[in-house]
Image: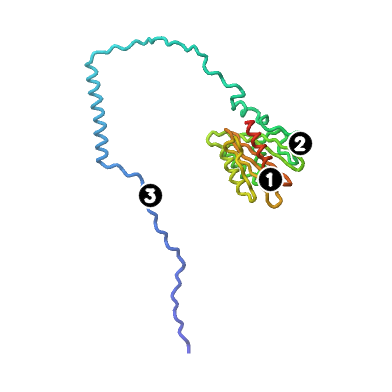
């Protein structure tokens, strides 16, 4: 006996539901007829007032004009303020050779194991290579309007010292203070870190790091358009006195 085959309902294909139409964005509200009539009346009122003013002025007698000659003003006999000397004008120092503002290498110090510059200057590419992510640093310092950097390095025993003066254009931002603030935020996050304000700087901070056999110290400060960086690396803990002394003496030269 044959079993009748039941007809199956056709399976509808999966059709995505239509997305609801987005409401159109509202444009500026058009001005109505009343607004146009008020504007037209205001224009007519100005024109009528102008015409009346011309008619009134036409019937008035001419007014005599004052004499064009003026009394001669006496000249000042003072010589005016004297220009600042090179020692008083900070811009003379900071727009000159930054390398001359760096601390001198101590007597008996040797060359750094990893010299960063042959002549004491660092361009943006050379400066960015001092960071763990040079490409990120390069973009960041472009945004901060990097201008130039000077560096001095030396080695005393196992201790390495790097001091940098980094100058910013500061045409639209305060690059020097911005980068010091960023450097401080990173330095504070390192475990085993102690920090102190650098006397006489107003904004400088020194840090000593000691964790897992790695010893280093750093200091950051800024003055005008120049940011200061001091880095010390050693095989034993860096004394607070050492990093503070370097930072204070370098800031005095600015």
Residue at label 1?
216
**First along the sequence among labels 2 and 1:** 2
Where is residue 247 drawn, in percent x and y?
Answer: 65, 37
Q: Residue at x 23, y 13 (%)?
A: 61
Q: CA distance from mark 1 to mark 3?
A: 59 Å
Relative to 38, residue 75 above or below: above
Q: Earlier in the sequence, mark 1 or mark 3?
A: 3
Which residue is tagged 3? 25
Q: Quadrant of residue 183?
A: top right
> Left or right: where does residue 22 sit relative to residue 215?
left
Which residue appears at 24% of the width and 40% of the height?
34
Figure label count: 3
Q: Position of residue 117 (x, y in %)?
A: 71, 36
- Apparent side of residue 187 relative to residue 160 in the rendered image (left or right): left
Q: Nearer the viewer, mark 2 or mark 3?
A: 2
Binning the other alpha carbons within 10 Å of mark 2 as few (below 14), some (14 to 19) or many (20 upward) gives few
Mark 1 closeness class: few <14, some 14–19, many ≥20 residues within 10 Å: many
Q: CA distance from mark 2 to mark 3?
A: 71 Å
């Amino acid at each position: 006996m044959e079993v009748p085959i039941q007809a199956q309902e056709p399976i509808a294909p999966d059709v995505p539901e239509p997305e609801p139409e987005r409401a159109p964005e509202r444009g500026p509200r058009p001005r109505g007829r009343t607004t146009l009539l008020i504007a037209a009346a205001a224009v007519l009122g100005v024109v009528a007032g102008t015409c009346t003013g011309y008619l009134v002025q036409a019937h008035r007698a001419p007014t005599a004009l004052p004499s064009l000659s003026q009394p001669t003003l006496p000249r000042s006999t003072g010589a005016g303020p004297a220009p600042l000397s090179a020692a008083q004008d900070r811009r003379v120092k900071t727009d000159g050779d930054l390398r001359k503002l760096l601390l001198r290498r101590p007597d008996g110090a040797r060359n750094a194991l990893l010299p960063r510059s042959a002549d004491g200057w660092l361009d943006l590419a050379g400066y960015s290579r001092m960071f763990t992510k040079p490409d990120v640093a390069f973009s960041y310092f472009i945004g901060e309007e990097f201008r130039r950097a000077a560096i001095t390095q030396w080695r005393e025993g196992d201790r390495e010292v790097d001091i940098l003066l980094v100058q910013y254009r500061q045409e639209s931002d305060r690059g020097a203070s911005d980068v010091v603030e960023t450097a401080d935020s990173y330095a504070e996050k390192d475990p085993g870190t102690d920090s102190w304000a650098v006397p006489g700087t107003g904004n400088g901070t020194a840090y000593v790091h000691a964790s897992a056999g790695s010893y280093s110290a750093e200091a950051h400060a800024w003055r005008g358009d120049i940011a200061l960086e001091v880095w010390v690396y050693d095989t034993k803990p860096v004394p607070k006195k050492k990093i503070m002394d370097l930072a204070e003496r370098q800031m005095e030269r600015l």
